Amino acid sequence: MTSQMASDGNADLTKLKFYHGVQTREDTQLLMKDAQIGDFLLRTSFLKLEVKMIVYFCIKVCENDIHHYLIAFRNCQIVMKQELMDREGIKKIIESKPFNSFDEMINFYRVHRLACGIRLSRSLNRPKYQLRNSEVHYEESGKLGSGNFCTVYRGILKRGNREDIVAIKVSKQTEHPDPAQIMETKKELFAEAKIMIAYNHVNVIKLFGLACDLPPFMVCLEFCNGGSLESHLYKHGNEMEEFERQTLLIDSARGMRYLHANKCIHRDLASRNCLISAEGFIKIADFGLSKSLGADETKFKEALKEAPLVWLAPECIQKESEFSAKSDVWAFGVLMYEVYFNGAKPFSDEKDTSTLIRNIRKANMPLIDKRTKIPKMIELHSSIFTRKPEDRIDFQTILEKLVDSLISHDPLNLAKMEVNKLDGVERTKMPNICVEPEKMPRMLEPKSSHHSNMSNMHMMKKRDRNTGKKWANYNKEEKAGGGNSWSKNSTKTQSSSH
């Protein structure tokens, strides 16, 4: 892959604080939406017909207009090409004088006007969540899984004197790539991660950041030693005591309550998408189908072409599916079934999709009464499955009822938990039984040094799932993979197609 970034002995752009990596014009518009006139950043992109990187100096010239000036490197010097349109509507290129560095060019245009008539003001530095590619390290031996557009590795994120073990999603590079394919891969890889940027909770998977200096593009996430909850239930569910099942559900409910407090509808809550950390905590993961609602929104309608049927609420299985916090609550009821039946799914023996849909629409769901003797747990599970979403309880109520049902508050029960059998996992903390609504959660706002550089960007991805029957595009031959099981026992990560 050729690049003007390193040609003619030019210094490494990635060391510049205002270099934002590979970004499209649309990305830049979002990055600079809160910028002031004269603010600027540096980005790279690709030629449309050739896999060759080019450098743009982007400047906000008025409220809704950003100019993208091409940077050329000649004999170790920098030249900025400013494209303007004359009074007759004819485009013309005005080249700057050569500069020895970007600092020299920026200082010059802070005093002198650009061809568009403005002076440079402040640099928009890269936000904290944007990592340098050089900070992310992995080897082929650390491969955890692979999907359509990325491969997942266990690796290390090195920033200053700090090192974190992370799961790294790395964009795949084909033998004969084209610019459109490269940018679509970046879009797919980053779409889910951008939803997670602001979240900061012990029961939600942590995003460390995104790296897009150059291909391959990378996403760094919290590495969970214990793997997926689904795998744990399969392997150790038979020996699991009631206390552990309740603890796992309390963790999950607490994570979901946090997401809903932040207007996030997960839409894919299931044991396969809950990971187990080194501390034995449940982490809500896989935001590939998630959507953040506006301040005044409580629900939205959207047709799903493919989704795991048994986790969908009645209002979700219609021509125009409706999703809300209450549809996540329904999915939590299915998660409770999984936890009590050691990873098994409701209606696992039902082969007739029409019968399955009919049962869901009638809220005729199998309960956990055969697997627990605690009346309050049975009552809670039953109360979740209502036909109308407005009759369904919320996660605040779920959490209160789970805590009220907890059979023991004796820390000695921690030693009996099956999660302690997982390599690298030790549960030493009791479940958090505080049910008071959390204060407005502390959000890790994505900001540059001067401005907010990110808005909520969301994109729905069609994803194959490894369990459950499909709504709409029902597929009898279930596909392996699915979700972001960035963990030690992952074997495959299923991702969306282009």
Image (cartoon, rainbow, N blue to C red):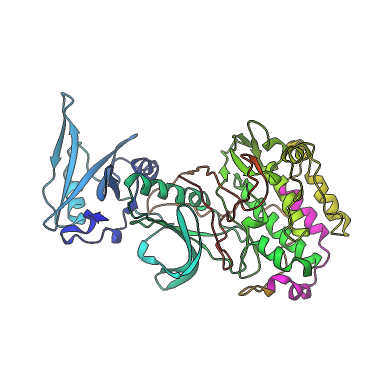
Image: magenta residue range: 395-420
Which quadrant: the N terminus? bottom left
Q: Nearer the viewer, residue 214 or 81?
A: 214
Q: Say if 322 sits above or below 79 in the image.
A: above
In the rendered image, residue 49, in percent from the top left (x then y), is placed at 27, 43
Horizontal side of 465 relative to 85 (left or right) equals: right
Figure label count: 0
Answer whether residue 409 is magenta in the image: yes
Q: Residue furthest top?
A: 88
Left or right: residue 85 versus residue 410 is left
Q: How far across and how far down the image is residue 17, in percent?
A: 32, 57
Q: In terms of image quadrants, where is residue 484?
A: bottom right
| Magenta-drawn stretch, dominant element (helix, strand or loop) | helix
> Can you see residue 268?
yes
Taking depth in this image into account, of 386 and 294 the one nearest to the observer is 386
**x, y percent for residue 404:** 82, 57
Left or right: 214 as drawn, with respect to 225? left
Residue drawn 72% across the image and 65% down it: 431
Residue 178 in the image, given as x and y percentages of width and height: 32, 47
Instruction: Decide which of 229, 397 is in the foreground and name it.
Output: 229
Task: Quadrant for residue 8, please give it.
Answer: bottom left
Question: Quadrant of the image for the C terminus?
Answer: top left
Instruction: Based on the picture, tell me whether residue 327 belongs to the magenta stretch.
Output: no
